[in-house]
Structure formats: C-alpha cells, structure tokens
Amino acid sequence: MGRLELELRKGPLAHGFAHDQRWTLGRIKTLIGRLFHVGYTVEGGGSLMRRHGWSAQVPVRQAMERDDEAGRGVERPGVARYKSTARDLGAFICFEDEAGQG
C-alpha cells in the first residue's frame, strides 16, 4: 500500500480537499484515481482500505488534552441510580461524544 498510505498521511488539504481534514471514501476514491489512474467504486475503496488495516471513524491524531486514565473508574454522580433503573427495565445506557460516537 506504500504510496497511497504516504499520500493519505499527508492529509486531505495536501490534495486539494479544503473543507476539512477528514478522509472520506469518496475522497479516497478520487485520490486513487488521480494517483494511479484506476477507477474504484466508493465501496471498493472501502474494501481496499480495510484489507490494508485502515478503519472507519478512527482519528489519526487525538486531542492533546485527552487523558484516558483520568476517567477510568470514575462515575458521574447519579449514574448508579440510572444503571439500576436501566437494569430493572432490561434497557441499556448509551453515552455519545460530540461526534455521535457511542
């Protein structure tokens, strides 16, 4: 995957995608066409990326302020009450971040 991976690591801005710094399958499809003069479908590009170890919705960089250890073992006040209510109802509690990732 050498050359494509190197180009992807440069980021979308380096390839003329100015709106944001996310690689979408459509952008990857376009990039493959530009670099290798090969036509892929969006689905085919996704399959290619998965075969080479890339996954969807996994950021390359993380926020500098992120502290994974800080939140371990800490529950917000009142969460235990909701946990027992959910358990009694046979329900699930789901948390999402700003991007809607649960």
Image (cartoon, rainbow, N blue to C red):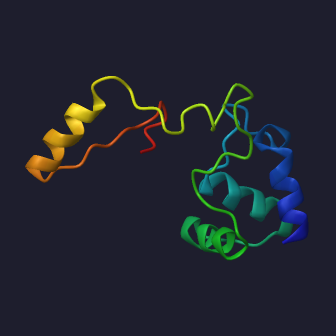
Question: Is residue 3 left or right of 80 when viewed as pictured?
Answer: right
Q: Which of 60 and 8 is in front in this view?
A: 60
Classify 42 as above or below 44.
Answer: above
Counting from the top left corner in percent of width and height, residue 39 is at 69, 71
User: In which quarter of the view is residue 65 placed?
Assistant: top right
Vertical relation: 77 (above or below) 74: above
* Residue 56 locus on image (x, y percent): 58, 57
The image position of residue 63, as x and y in percent, is 70, 31
In the figure, 65 relative to 57: above or below?
Answer: above
The residue at 38%/26% (across/down) is 76
Name the quadrant containing residue 32.
Answer: bottom right
Residue lying at 54% horizontally and 33% vertically, measured from the top left: 71
Q: Given the current orientation, which residue lies at the most extreme left position?
A: 89
Looking at the image, residue 42 sits to the left or right of residue 13; the answer is left
Whole-percent x, y for residue 89 in the image: 9, 48
Q: Residue at x 23, y 49 (%)?
A: 92
